[in-house]
Amino acid sequence: MKFFLDTADLDEIKEAASWGALAGVTTNPTLYSRIGGKLDDFHNHIARICEIVDGPVSAESVAMTRDEIIRDGRELAKIAPNVVVKIPTMVEGLAACRALSDEGIRVNMTLCFSVPQAILAARAGARYISPFVGRFDDISEDGLSQLGDVVTAIGNYDYSESTANGEQVEIIAASIRSANHVTQSALMGADIATVPFNVLKKMVQHPLTDRGLESFLKDWEKVANA
Ligand code: G3P
């Protein structure tokens, strides 16, 4: 499994990148607004993220028609070679995904909540598909089981002919709220988990690691004082 950081915060991205396990970044309009992002600085901000991270950096279009999304997508893709255009899973989004993918522009189809949506996205040439786990749980459904169904259904077929550059579609477990979500996503075979920084920090922690470290340090003091 690969890890993306789900944030627009440059400090979090720099810190996570220094841990050595960061493969990419996903952003969305909410995450950009959370850091006080300004409309006219959006492209520059994505460029700054791309300077920190070599891997895919998802930048979302907020346009609602296919022509506008395509225009947006082309502009976003010019920012850096590793920009992935993030598009909501809706009819206009699918049409834009097909067009952008045919131009060799990578697309991450987001706000995906069902197997049929995921299959349509894969057929429309999506390079990444992002089923949301936490938000499905929020409506008293089972987000992990939905994710597992998407991983299985997409894995049953070869969609590489659908993407213009022949790459395999990858499933991003999104809307991840806990380290257990990461564990279960990995067991289900999701290719990537995109995690908020607070979850990434929890992923490193274990009480037995803390307890073990404490006792090693105490015993080492005995050695030092012997
Ligand atoms: O990548 C999508 C993710 O940012 C949504 O997370 O926690 O807002 O549902 P959340």
Image: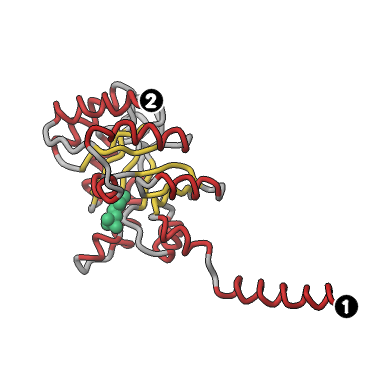
* Residue 80: image location, x then y, percent: 39, 27
Residue 165, numbered label: 2
Mark 2 closeness class: few <14, some 14–19, many ≥20 residues within 10 Å: some
Is there CB contact under 8 Å for labels 2 and 1?
no
Q: Quadrant of residue 132?
A: bottom left
Residue 139, numbered label: none
Residue positioned most to the right: 226
Disc 2 Cβ-to-ligand 1 distance below 8 Å: no
Q: Gap between marks 2 and 1, in whole Å?
A: 65 Å
Residue type, numbered disc 1: Ala
Mark 1: secondary structure:
loop
Residue at mark 1: 226
Q: Quadrant of the C terminus?
A: bottom right
**Label 2 or label 1, whichever comes before in sequence order:** 2
Residue drawn 39% across the image and 62% down it: 181
* Residue 49: image location, x then y, percent: 40, 37
Q: Is residue 131 visible?
A: no
Camera-nearest label, 2 or 1: 1
